[in-house]
Amino acid sequence: MFRRILIANRGEIAVRVIRACREMEIETVAVYSSADADALHVQLATRSVCIGPPQAGQSYLNMDAILQVAIATRCDAIHPGYGFLSENDVFSDRCAAEGIKFIGPTGDVIRQMGNKSAARSLMQKSGVPVVPGSDGNVDIETGAVIAAKIGYPVLVKASAGGGGRGMRRVDKPEDFAALFAEAQSETMTNFGDDKMYVEKLIVNPHHIEFQVMADSKGNVVHFGERECSIQRKNQKLMEESPSHLLTPEVRAAMGDAAVTAARAAGYEGAGTIEFVMDDDLHYYFIEMNTRIQVEHPVTEMVCDVDLVREQIRVAAGLTLAYKQADICQRGWAIECRINAEDPMNGFRPSPGKTNFLHFPGGCGIRVESALYVGYNPSPFYDSMVAKVIAHGANRLEAIQRMRRALEEIVIDGYPTTVELCYLILHDPVFVRGNYNTGFLESEMDELMKWNRVGAGLDPIEVNQ
């Protein structure tokens, strides 16, 4: 087992990893930017080292600085968390070259699965369903021919893209060339790569992802699905597990497909296989996230597993502690992401000083956060300041517990998404479980008209 791990991240995920390491009696080294000198992960780690100024490019994305600290502090491994360098193939390669274990897949696997076109081709060869589209990268002319063949609307997507960048919806042939060029330019600006591919747009699908874990001995398991269809501009706001949509037969088939995908990639570590699903329960692979996900706690709650601990174990060369037959989903879990954003003003980031803070507790409630009274969330990084997770015996109980938790939470000093999440939990479409990725866009105006006093669940039948 590792003796000392450097955590190349910040915020709640850095705190989450530190806590897992403490329980495993592993020392931790936190790195931080000058903007994060008073951050919670800096205070909790065994040792902390400043690696640069606030700008991420000069600190949390600075491979040289991070590796220098890892070598100087004699770390056995680096945990990248999510975001920043977590899916950077060059960083994984450089860790390996220095004899430091990157807690994640190899650079080759990250390259393969990070290139959406290559990943799509691999899935096709492995028998995993993919959305109809091009078999590889295409230029404007070839893309237009394929779009006409598969039918509009289509998505033009960056092979190396992510986070909704380098992607455009095209509804009619006459717009294809202009939108392709626009997406390609954005791709080059953000990723330094202009390779594009085309696929059929599944309108307002369900976003279903499966958590997988693989060790270095070829063992692969999945820990069930997460429903992630409450999104704004391709960014998730709420997640739940299991999905109300899946039948036992479809769940089993998708789980098998997720394991097949991980095996085909030669995967090692914690990862997520993402699918879109239409209303007829046809599902299609869209991508693999080669890291731990923000929303991993909902899976931990329903499967009674510590995914970060298991991620560290398999990275250290140990055999998976679970066989597929050992894993089952118990009850229901919902996660709300609490962002320092103002939903009433276009979700404008709204950092400020945390004047007062009270997190909810009680049966079935978990909070992941790096906030404390007096802390100023930095405007330089992602706006998420906390995650609230509620677990219950069924979906109704999980909803009721989350509603109660959001009634209790107090974050004074800046606007957050607490109110919006609370309103969503009372929306009839959500409560009945009839929502898809178009939910927030279609319901946002109505949600903003509501207030907490008038919301009620009693007359609505909950899909359990």
Image: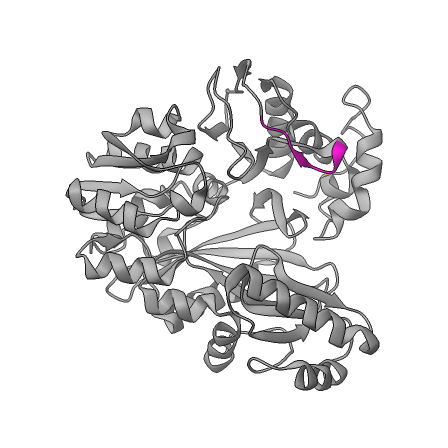
Nearer-the-camera pick, 252 or 230: 230
**Residue 208: percent from the left, percent from the top?**
58, 56
**Residue 168: percent from the left, percent from the top?**
70, 65
**Residue 369: percent from the left, percent from the top?**
46, 29
Instruction: Tell me what residue is drawn at x 79 percent, y 19 percent.
Output: 453
Instruction: Tell me what residue is drawn at x 25 percent, y 56 percent.
Output: 95
Query: Start and end of the magenta stretch?
Result: 345-351
- Which quadrant is the C terminus positioned in? top right
Q: Give the image quarter of residue 207.
A: bottom right
Residue 391 in sight in this render: no
Outermost residue toward the top in this view: 356
Nearer-the-camera pick, 296 or 61: 61
Nearer-the-camera pick, 396 or 133: 133
**Residue 212: percent from the left, percent from the top?**
41, 57
Left or right position of 269 against 185: left
Instruction: Tell me what residue is drawn at x 65 percent, y 77 percent.
Output: 132
Instruction: Tell me what residue is drawn at x 72 percent, y 86 percent.
Output: 145
- On screen, 372 above or below 176? above
Marks counted in the figure total: 0
Whether residue 297 appears in magenta in the rendering, the answer is no
- On screen, 348 above or below 310? above
Q: Give the image quarter of residue 449.
A: top right
